[in-house]
Image (tube, grey):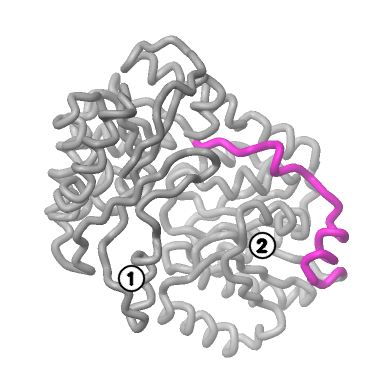
Amino acid sequence: MLHYVQRYGHELQVVAPVPYFPNVPIFARWSRYSQIPRQEKQQGITVLHPRYLATPKVGMMLYGWHMFLGSLASVKRLQRCFDFAVIDAHFLYPDAFAAILLGLVTKRPVIVSARGTDVHLYTRLLGIKPLLRFVLHRAAAVITVCQKLKDMILELGIPEEKIRVIGNGIDLRQFYPGDRLAARRRLGLPLDKTLILSVARIAEVKGIHHLIDAVARVRRQRPEVQLLLVGNCEDSAYLKALERQVAQANLAGAVHFFGSQPHGALRGWYNACDLFCLGSAREGWPNVLLEALACGKPVVASRVGGIPEIVVSADYGLLVDPPHGESFAAVIHTALNKSWVTEKLVHYATGFSWDQVSAKQESLFQQVVPIPNRRSDSHRDFKP
């Protein structure tokens, strides 16, 4: 959205509600929300953080209402000094549900975007599925990041003409090839090993356990292979299970957890690796695949969600189906033995620039709210 509004001269302010929770250190996962400011600037954009009631693990059907009620006063005050023409909401529930209600109050159209889990998982929840239908029927337009999500939304009875597929883009100024050995030296990685990289949350849905199993199998023939795992973890039980798996497979020196890394630093990790892998059980449109390709790295990924819409040719990567350790190991072997053309990988990734994505967004937004492209600094800063 930042790239879109800058490219076409529109104006943007963001309302990003966060759950209310007191500053109680023993509940570190939730108390961190108390440290988020009520208002901040991110890359020149005003971001408001109103609080809403969230009851962990219970009452999910009410989350959308709570987010709406928690955001209502801030949005109404915002409208008085920033007369927005449209509300753009990402993730169908609870975010887009709250946005639809805010659109009714402010009398503004709402465009909603489906990202992945909000369709793959939430359509299976009996109490949430009707709320998704409400959001999709009331929205002025629906964006999905891949055709697979569009097909699933069509099954909910939503008119096809309302849905537009617009995949995510990547910043080609940030992701491009670089010297592999130099990247390894900067990161303190071994220079003489075959490095497989995965950038993903350390969560079961991302299939990290399958990748570890696969690497154990691959190392029987290629003992120089190592696995680098970059990503945050909020599931300590799963992380401990992975650490036990690593120990039992005698992979202590071959599997490395590097935790969360700044997005701006990821180019170095991509350039340092020989192969990029993603073992997710479900996905929308994983940007990490395009980022790796833009850095000239081939990919191996599970055949789920929008991934086959990214890896459309064996010239760019290989798909695994079904995603488990044995099948991943076989495909990784093939990928490591294959001759890849770096220039072809990079050229393909250039077709997914933010400029191209923004052009599709502009077409849709103008369809919903025809407004001339313009640049203006006339709006006043919002005062909470």
Res 318 label: none
In this view of the protein, which residue sits in the foreground, 240 or 68? 68
Residue bearing the label numbered 1: 30
- Asked which secondary structure carries label 2, the reply is strand
Looking at the image, residue 310 sits to the left or right of residue 256; the answer is: left
Residue 85 spot, x, y in % from top left = 31, 22
Residue stretch in magenta: 168-191
In this view of the protein, which residue sits in the foreground, 363 or 277? 363
In magenta stretch: residue 44 = no
Res 197 label: 2
**Residue 56, picture quadrant:** bottom left
In magenta stretch: residue 180 = yes
Looking at the image, residue 340 sits to the left or right of residue 145; the answer is: right
Residue 300 spot, x, y in % from top left = 62, 54
Residue 287 spot, x, y in % from top left = 55, 45
Instruction: Note whether 4 is above or below 331 in the view shown.
Output: above
- Name the amino acid, label 2: Leu
In primary-sequence order, the first of circles 2 and 1 is 1
| x 55%, y 42%: residue | 43
| x 35%, y 53%: residue | 38
Using the numbered discs, state the Cα–Cα distance from disc 2 to disc 1 in whole angstroms.
Answer: 30 Å
| x 30%, y 30%: residue | 87
